[in-house]
Amino acid sequence: MASASASASTSAKVVEDHDLLLGPGATRQGLKWTAPPSRLELVQVHYLVRHGERTPVRTRLQNAKPAIPTSWPYCHVGSEFAAAVADFAPGPPDAKGKSPAKVPDGPWRGPDSWRGKMDIRKGTENTDRHDRPVPGAPGECLLGELTDLGRQSTHALGQLLRETYIDKLGLLPQRLSADDANAVYFRSTNMSRTVESAQSLIRGLLPQTRDAQDEYTPTLLIRNGTTENLLPNTFGCARLRALDAQFASMAAQVHNARLSAFDEGIAPHCDGAPPRIDGHPRLNGILDTVRAAVAHGVPFPSVFEEPGTMRVVERAVVDEWFSGYHAEDAALRNQYRRLAMGRLLNDLAGRLYNKATNGDRDPLKLAVYCAHDTSLAGLLSTLDAFDNRWPAFTASLGLELFRDRSPAAQPSILSVLGIGRSAPQHYVRLRYGDKSLKLPACAAKGAHLEGEPELCTLEAFKSAVEALRRPDGMSWEKECQEGRGSKSSK
């Protein structure tokens, strides 16, 4: 039986080594990068990053002891910004003698073009119990907004990536020029907290962006939600949405009875509602709120500091969201993985293979993708490397591509006849936070560098990704329509 104590946490400060509450995958003590055997040369790196610390996505635990506040005053940086604006010039007079503003002809950028910047301040507004507007406090955050701490942690990760891959390893020049635009690739999902995390990370990675006159301007790519593949896209895939609901329901059936052991300790902080996967508030919402409070040093009920309680709560929520990747039914498991993460893995494997095949003819050296907790956990689950722990804010998953420079690994002269190796041997290493991972798909002899189980051959990695594809070649879009029924005429 969990403790019924309602006393406040004895310490509201963030304890950086409190992994149980903060979660894995972050780089709090640095990347701890380890050099591979000297004959391997780093040629390309991809980093998938969860956004930085944010506020809870909904107001919960307002009547807890202590209560979780509804107002989080941690968004001062985001309230001051410069907006891109257009000063439209008057057009030719119309029949009435008026000169309406018109969009100027291109070019669409430059000091003499249409583009300008306007300093603007963002504030929040609330309402009282009579629905009258009430100005928010300075620096008050919106729900789910990236906080000042989130900007700081993503900026710090950018600095760590720079220290390792630019300063130490020389993967990119110290200062990028316009000619280096294709050497980097930056992408984010279309949510404000990931876009702003990407901006902070890029600033830490490329301090030259402080120079307003710098010749290099980073490009941050964003896709529409229907085609996004940086996360399990239940919005754009009806079949994945149905599977997701199915496995969440199964998780509730499995875990709700176990969670009843913690009713006495948790229910008093949730207006008497017992902690359940499908309860109100939902269990994942409770965990999300506690994680945000821990990260920002906000006092929270001490019951959530009890390791026995939090391990059960976290495992239940992890199963609610990610058990589909580990379904006992192989067909369902493969379909879930394919629809959730198959397209992203295909993109990553394709870029790695393209670099290995084309060498210096492929300019891409560093790619950063700002996404979500479900992105990292989904990718790790699909590769059978997930630790069943909810990823931390600013958790990162790196894929490093190494080329073997040893003579034995080089193409054979017979390769022109189709005999022997046609390209140098390449290896892929996954790094989750500050740790290198061993992939089960690369465990067999010959599927990794001998004596280095973390260094998976590119062929083995590519084969693991290709195994997710449907044998009949059905597209993601078509498979997503399975079981959807007739479309609306609207």
Image: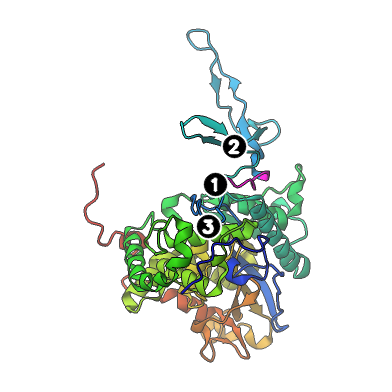
Q: Is residue 250 visible?
A: yes
- Which of the two discs, 2 and 3, labels the residue nearer the N terminus? 2
Q: How far apart are marks 1 and 3 (CA)?
A: 11 Å
Query: Residue at the location (65% across, 35% down)?
Result: 121
Closer to the camera, 47 or 462? Answer: 47
Q: SS class of the residue under badge 3?
A: helix
Q: Mark 3 Cα within 10 Å, few/some/many (few <14, many 20+)? A: many
Secondary structure predominantly adopted by residues drawn in magenta: loop
Pick out the residue farthest to the top: 96
Identity, as a three-letter code, of the amino acid under mark 1: Thr
Say the numbered circle drawn on residue 70.
1
Residue 289 vs 390, above or below: the answer is: above
Which residue in the structure is indicated by mark 3? 289
Please check the rendered image and state whether residue 353 is part of the magenta-colored stretch, yes or no.
no
Q: Mark 1 Cα within 10 Å, few/some/many (few <14, many 20+)? A: some
Closer to the camera, 249 or 436? Answer: 249
Closer to the camera, 297 or 216? Answer: 297
The x and y percentages for residue 244 are 36, 64
Which region shows up in magenta?
A: 70-77
Specify whether 348 is left or right of 11.
left
The x and y percentages for residue 386 are 51, 75
The x and y percentages for residue 76 are 67, 43
Specify whether 183 is left or right of 289.
right
Do residues under tags 1 and 3 come within 8 Å of each other at their CB atoms? no
Specify whether 69 is left or right of 247.
right
Closer to the camera, 225 or 450? Answer: 225
Which residue in the structure is indicated by mark 2? 136
